[in-house]
Amino acid sequence: MSDKEANPESQHETMSSTSNVGNGNISWIYSFSAAMVPFASFCYAHQRGVTVKVINAMARSPVGVYGFFALPFITLGMEKSIYDTVQAMQGIDPTVIPEGRGGFPSGGGNLPSFSLIPVQRFPTRNESSSIQRLRTKMS
């Protein structure tokens, strides 16, 4: 039995010390919005009858009912695009696989990035302090 399994309190302390929630960091709002905005839009569109219109249009298209086989791949691509874009917004490269991770379901780093924006770069603590010193010297 590992130390974390034997002492669940230490695991809780580790999780709470690494969490950014409650520390004034609101980066969680990006992930929340990326999940809820498309879902809410889908629910609204479904209530308005858009889903039936899309299915009818797909069935009547030149591709026909075989186009239904493409829908899972299209929706997975849209989901990966949203996920990769949110990760890039938060400064996380979606193509990097962290140590100790991998396999299903976290194998998305093996795929190409579908991010709509480049990975954002935030200044490190040392860079922030040197920028602050430069600003004080200039003023």
Image (cartoon, grey):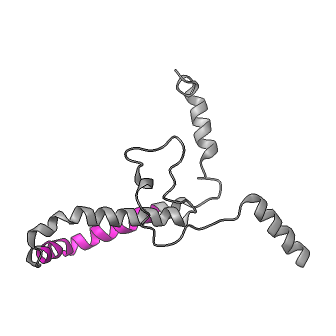
**Extreme-top residue of the structure:** 1
Q: What count of labels does the image hold? A: 0
The verdict on residue 47 being magenta is: yes
**Res. 48 in view:** yes
Image vertical order of residue 136 relative to residue 95, above or below: below
x 20%, y 66%: residue: 70
Q: Which residues are magenta?
A: 32-58
- Residue 30 is situated, as x and y percent measured from the top left of the image, at 50, 64
- Residue 34 is situated, as x and y percent measured from the top left of the image, at 43, 65
| Prevailing SS of the magenta stretch | helix
Image quadrant of residue 15? top right
Q: Is residue 14 left or right of residue 138?
A: left
- Residue 61 is situated, as x and y percent measured from the top left of the image, at 11, 78
- Residue 139 is situated, as x and y percent measured from the top left of the image, at 89, 79
Front residue of this view, candidates 29 and 91: 91
Front residue of this view, candidates 102 and 59: 102
Q: Is residue 37 left or right of residue 5?
A: left
Front residue of this view, candidates 128 and 53: 128
**Res. 139 in view:** no
Q: Is residue 40 left or right of residue 83?
A: left
Image quadrant of residue 60? bottom left
x 53%, y 60%: residue: 93
Front residue of this view, candidates 13 and 64: 64
Image vertical order of residue 49 relative to residue 104, above or below: below
x 56%, y 28%: residue: 4
x 55%, y 59%: residue: 92
